[in-house]
Image: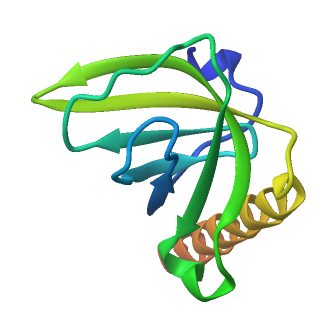
Amino acid sequence: MSLEERLSKRFDDIGRFESSEICALPASLENISKNGCRVRFRFPVNLDLDNDYEAKITFARSASEGSLSLLCKPQWSKEENGCTIIGFMILPSKDFARLGEYVEHLHLEENDSNLEDQIKDSSCQII
């Protein structure tokens, strides 16, 4: 899915993606949006692109708040250097609203960071 087709902006973020239906070992979260995510398993993984999978996502920056329970549908899968990278669409599920709040927080942080950068880059000249 191209960036133009995405429903919402993705944010680079790290965390843990667990789905016992896919693999007993967790994957690393690479990015997240309110509608999807990309994860990386450090080894080959087979999955059925037609299935929906129950998953738990734990964000590194908010691990103390616990995991989010979400229903995910794989959109694509590819192997790269012995790893499996999977793009998921996140379906409305138990913690879908909490995910929306988390992504909104990421969006606000990005906006604050951009504003700080603009202030640092601007300079006043007295003539």
Write down the quadrant of residue 10 in the picture: top right
Q: What is the quadrant of the N terminus in the image?
A: top right
> Of residues 100 and 122, which is closer to you in this image?
100
User: Picture coordinates of residue 119 (x, y %)?
Assistant: 59, 78
Q: Residue at x 44, y 21 (%)?
A: 47
Furthest-top residue in this view? 50
Tell which of 109 and 93 is nearer to you.
93
Task: Identify which residue, 121 or 82, lies in the foreground.
Answer: 82
Q: Quadrant of residue 97?
A: bottom right
Image coords of residue 77 (percent x, y): 40, 19
Name above or below for residue 90 compared with residue 104.
Answer: above
User: Where residue 87 sits in the image (x, y, percent)?
Assistant: 50, 28
Q: Please count the marks in the image.
A: 0
Q: Which residue sits at x=84%, y=52%?
A: 96
Above or below residue 125? Residue 6 is: above
Would you say residue 18 is visible in this rendering? yes
Inspect this view and state whether residue 124 appears: no
Residue at 58%, 73% in the rendered image:
113
Q: Quadrant of residue 2?
A: top right
Residue 16 vs 41, above or below: the answer is below
Q: Is residue 100 left or right of residue 60?
A: right
- List the single residue furthest toward the left: 81
List x then y, in percent, for residue 50: 62, 10
**Which quarter of the image is occupied by the C terminus?**
bottom right
State the residue in front, 22 or 59: 22
Q: What residue do we see at 33% from left, 52% from top?
A: 25
Name the side, left or right, on which 4 lies relative to 120: right
